[in-house]
Amino acid sequence: MNLNKKSEWLRSPGFGLLVRLFLGGVFIYASLDKIQNPAAFAKIIDNYRILPLVTVNLLAIFLPWLELIIGVCLILGIARNGSSFILSGMILVFILAIGSVLIRGLDISCGCFTTSSEGDPIALKRLLEDLGFLILSLYLWLGPDSLWHWRLPRLWRSSLPA
Amino acid sequence: MNRDFIKTRMDQAVKEMLILLVLSAGIGLIYNTLSRNGLPLIARSQVQYSPEGQSFRSGSENPGAGYSDLRLINRAAAYRYFQSDSAVFLDARPVEDYLQGHIPGAMSVPIEKLVPEQVAKIPRERLLITYCSDPDCHQAFDLANALLDLGFGPVLVFHEGMSGWRLANYPIVRSSDESK
């Protein structure tokens, strides 16, 4: 019983809202610099040496906007399932990418929050940070409804199970 | 938290996810088209490729590429130089990689530990061709730049490197074979 009481805050809608605001803020903040400097961001993606060159620019164009839109969705509480699912997917990909860089011992900048080549090196810190984000994001996806959230209009989910 | 629960959440997520992905891709593409900083959709290699190693320039689309005026050759051209023995191949990779297999007759000149004694052994009168492991590696370019700075004559970069050489099934020696 005691345990249940202690973990009650985990199920409170207010906590979900806080997590949403936090992750949304983080991802919107992370997206802005990349949207303004797509060339620098493309170079950073290329430096990871994971993707073939032909896909690098496309990802540099697409990913920052995905981050921004997901961030806005989280803050406004729109499409909670879809946005938190994509969020978890993105963070998982980031974790794999950073992990592979650490394993290969590449000395490149992360491009996580800034496209400047200084002050954002890939380090274990980033990996742990992303693991934390992943846990929060999975909480959003699988956890209880949070305060003030909306689903997409009925038109879009007419074929979904009730 | 059982499997059905996750499946339901997953089903709900899929449609919203598609909408969000398409939306992001659409806005991203539109913004990229309208923005002054827009990128070409398909990234091109930083170094322009020239089959015969004649014309060459590093791409101006990617500032900061850092490699100026290096001449590149592909594996067919490299193989012709190899067969006619008209060039000296320089292996820019670390010695361990060199020992595991290199182009026959190539000298090991690891750029990361470049020492004057090694540079002194490089013939000045001959055409030099640098290479490293694959098209993504930088050592061959760095070595070629360093040699040009040191006043060495014509230097070509075989940018496909050992991986390209292997793919073509051209001969490879290990150092132990050569010393026999």
Image (cartoon, coloured by chain):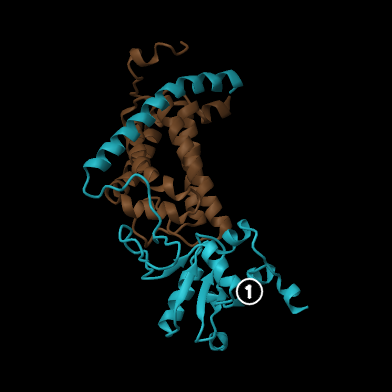
Chain colours: A brown, B cyan
Rendering coords of residue B81 (x, y %):
55, 71
Q: Between B92 and A155, which is closer to the camera in this rendering?
A: B92
Q: Residue at x 32, y 41 (%)?
A: A28
Q: Between A75 and B117, which is closer to the camera in this rendering?
A: B117
Give the residue number, with chain letter if any, for mark 1: B95
Q: Is residue A103 left or right of residue B23?
A: right
Rendering coords of residue B169 (x, y %):
65, 59
Q: Between A37 and A32, which is closer to the camera in this rendering?
A: A37
Q: Is residue B114 above or below residue A85?
A: below
Q: Residue at x 64, y 76 (%)?
A: B105
Residue B167, picture quadrant: bottom right
**Residue A146 visible, this orientation:** no
Kind of residue sitting beneath label 1: Val
| Element class at badge 1 | helix
The quadrant the C terminus of chain B occupies is: bottom right
Q: Residues within 10 Å of mark 1 (few under 14, many from 20)?
A: some
The quadrant the N terminus of chain B occupies is: top right
Q: Is residue B133 above or below residue A138?
A: below
Task: Spot the residue most to the right.
Answer: B180
